Image (tube, helix red, strand yellow):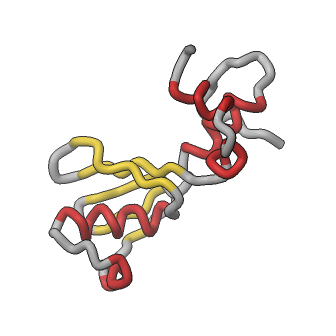
């Protein structure tokens, strides 16, 4: 087994799992990686990371947190993420590449 992605290939629910976004956030205040969110847009992920870092777990109120966007990234408070989530493309590249190779940025047609 090469990586955890091999488990996705054998998972009975792999089609549902492959369609989910995986967003890694980054804490600009500490310079460390923030939480990873699955199934959220990058906008929702940075709002959630910002809110949860402040002890706010009322997900229905996350819209109150300011969102700052530019061409490539989105930010809320100290947390940022790329607008294009990496999880979906990485999983599709692994499952659909044919040669088993994993190359960041590969996309299925």
Q: Is residue 44 left or right of residue 8?
A: left
The location of residue 60, given as percent across then percent down, is 37, 83
Judge by depth and name the residue closer to the eye, 11 or 91.
11
Count the marks.
Answer: 0
The location of residue 105, given as percent across then percent down, is 63, 35
Residue drawn at (63%, 25%) of the image:
103
Q: Is residue 102 left or right of residue 50?
A: right
Q: Quadrant of the C terminus?
A: top right
The location of residue 28, given as percent across then percent down, is 23, 52
Q: Is residue 72 left or right of residue 94?
A: left
Hey, which residue is sitting farthest front in the picture?
12
The location of residue 17, given as percent across then percent down, is 62, 48
Above/below status of 107 relative to 101: below
Above/below status of 23 relative to 74: above
Residue drawn at (29%, 48%) of the image:
34
The image quarter containing residue 13 is top right
Q: Is residue 81 left or right of residue 64?
A: right
Residue drawn at (48%, 54%) of the image:
38
Above/below status of 99 relative to 92: above
Residue drawn at (38%, 71%) of the image:
68
Q: Quadrant of the N terminus?
A: top right
Judge by depth and name the residue closer to the eye, 106 or 22.
22
Above/below status of 7 relative to 32: above
Judge by depth and name the residue closer to the eye, 19 or 89.
19
């Amino acid at each position: 087994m090469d990586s955890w992605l091999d488990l996705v290939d054998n998972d009975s629910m792999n089609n549902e799992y492959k369609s989910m976004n995986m967003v890694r956030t980054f804490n600009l205040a500490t310079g460390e990686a923030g939480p990873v969110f699955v199934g959220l847009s990058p906008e929702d992920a940075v709002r959630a990371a910002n809110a949860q870092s402040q002890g706010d777990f009322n997900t229905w109120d996350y819209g109150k947190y300011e969102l700052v966007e530019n061409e490539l990234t989105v930010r809320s408070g100290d947390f940022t993420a790329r607008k294009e989530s990496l999880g979906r493309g990485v999983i599709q590249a692994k499952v659909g590449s044919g040669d088993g190779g994993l190359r960041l940025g590969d996309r299925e047609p």
